Amino acid sequence: MIIKNIALALVMLLNLTTEDKSGNITIKIKNLSSSKGYLQLSVYNKKDGFPNKEKSTFKTFYFDIKESHNGLFNIKNIPYGAYAISTYHDENSNGKLDTNFFGIPKEKTGASNNPDSDYMPSFSDAIFQLSTGKKMLEIRLK
């Protein structure tokens, strides 16, 4: 009987510690230049590939700009942890970030924490913690 109670307690403890903890992130995008195209939001959980290597993302989301409510975009069921987000407004809907000859973006881009940089932001500048059911971020496009 004692062994059965211990086994039951261990199973209950394992269920508590492995319970899926996830939250939703609402992102307010500032400086959208038009309601054309879509917004690509790339969520990274490691620095490798940040901010523009899509193969390295944890998850990537595409939002039709016309479907946004006052520039608000929601991503749901993201496990608690540390993340950084990069985004761009694909105004011409061609599925890529357009750049000039030197690789400088022609379309507006942004990152979580709004790093002040004229160059690509680093993961450490854009990282934030998701540790509650709801998180609100504001990203300014440049």
Image: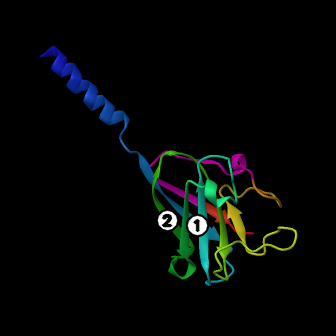
Q: Residue furthest top?
A: 2
Indicate left or right for 62 with 19 as reference.
Answer: right
Q: What's the amino acid at mark 1?
A: Lys
| Neighbour tally class for label 1: few under 14, some 14-19, many 20 plus, Cα within 10 Å | some
Kindly identify which residue carries mark 2: 74
Q: In this view of the protein, which residue sits in the foreground, 63 or 30?
A: 63
Quadrant of the image containing the C terminus: bottom right
Q: Residue furthest left?
A: 1
SS type, badge 2? strand
Quadrant of the image containing the N terminus: top left
Which residue sits at x=26%, y=29%?
Answer: 11
Q: Is residue 133 visible?
A: no
Let me know if residue 128 is in the magenta part.
Answer: yes
- Residue 107 is situated, as x and y percent measured from the top left of the image, at 74, 75
Let me know if residue 66 is in the magenta part.
Answer: no
Q: Nearest to the eye among marks 2 and 1: give it.
A: 2
Mark drawn on residue 28: 1
Indicate left or right for 86 with 79 as reference.
Answer: right
Q: Which residues are magenta?
A: 122-137
Indicate left or right for 131 with 110 as reference.
Answer: left
Residue 110: quarter of image: bottom right
Give above or below for 133 relative to 26: above
CA–CA distance in space, label 2 to label 1: 9 Å
